[in-house]
Image (cartoon, grey):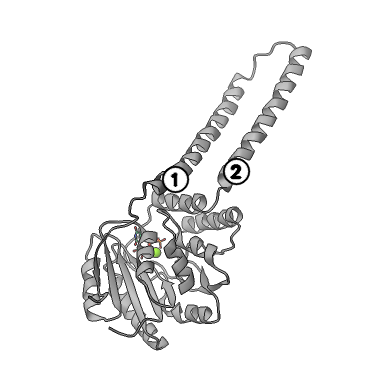
Amino acid sequence: MPDKPYISIVIPVYNEELNLPPLIDRLYPVMEQIGKPFEIIFTDDGSRDSSLSILQGMAEKFPEVRVIEFNGNFGQHMAILAAFEKSTGKIVITLDADLQNPPEEIPRLVREVEKGHDVVGTIRQKRRDSMFRKVASRIVNITTNKMTGMHMSDYGCMLRAYHRNVVNNINRCQETTTFIPALAQTFSANPTEIEVAHAERSEGESKYSLYKLIRLNFDLMTGFSVVPLQLFALMGILTALFSVAFAVFLLVRRFIIGAEVEGVFTLFAILFFFIGIIIFGIGLVGEYVGRIYQEVRKRPRYVVRRLHGFGE
Ligand code: UDP
Ligand code: MG
């Protein structure tokens, strides 16, 4: 076994067979150049391609590589959390397996932590994703900052560095659904952000369908803030006030003009609009109730089938 690691690299993997060999080829020189003891923890998030056997091979070949084998697909954030719990480095760095985050940026992240920052966030420079993803991210970044009172320029970039203390606090949380950069931010005393390069996905396709992206953003919005509920209550009050004013207006017209029956379809339009808002409201409450339900069931958040390369 090598020395106790100073840096832990954490990488979630879901069907990334083509990306793993080039990733390791680029990561190792960078880590060796830093010259401190390190470990690389991969979590295989239930891959159905040959990712797991490639990772097993790496764990046998490289003493620094460890692999957590999940019993199924529990999602990127659970994969990272499992690796956090196993990590021992003083600095923990998360990275995507698809080479969108260049490993060459790691030394800069390490330097920022060594300067005393306990969370080093990143902003993707010249982000290489579809227009749709970029616009959606902008909206998410702005609304999340407003709602949570946090300040992060780029919630989506997973190339980040965390000090051991922050990781320990994250490990104490037992939330079933979470969003790690936001969770880390709540424990950070001295965060910073740097710009990093961003590449196109090297091989394969994004593992996030539109539905999974929407789910993830609900986790971010409802997991870190009750502002959506509060806004909804506020909107209800405003609508009620407006309808009282409208009723008074109609009453006065009734006395001045007499009975009126025109505008029935306008009325329908208005009605449908409000029904839409009500359904949205029920859904929103449902999001929170669902989260509470998941928490109280206290089921295991993920299931590890086997560990590779951890010694023993
Ligand atoms: N990932 C994972 N489990 C999942 C989905 C994704 O471990 O259910 C991993 C994936 O292998 C990659 C990282 O999370 O290393 C980011 O995924 P992806 O590149 O598909 O996301 P995008 O860059 O499109 O946001
Ligand atoms: Mg990616």
Q: 135 or 161, which lies in front?
A: 161
The kind of secondary structure element at disc 1 is helix
Query: Toward which corner of the image does residue 231 lie, by quadrant?
Result: top right
| Mark 2 residue type | Gln
| Name of the residue lying farthest toward the right | 256
**Which labelled disc corresponds to residue 72?**
none
Q: Position of residue 31 (x, y in %)?
A: 38, 83
| Mark 1 residue type | Ile
Q: Quadrant of ligand 1?
A: bottom left
210 w.r.t. 11: above or below: above
Query: Toward which corner of the image does residue 96 lie, by quadrant?
Result: bottom left
Q: 16 or 46, which lies in front?
A: 46
Q: Residue at x 58, y 60 (%)?
A: 150
Question: From the image, which quarter does the C terminus lie in?
Answer: bottom left
Does residue 98 appear in this view? no
- The nearer-to-camera label among 1 and 2 is 1
Q: 148 or 263, which lies in front?
A: 148
Residue wearing tag 1: 292
Residue wearing tag 2: 230
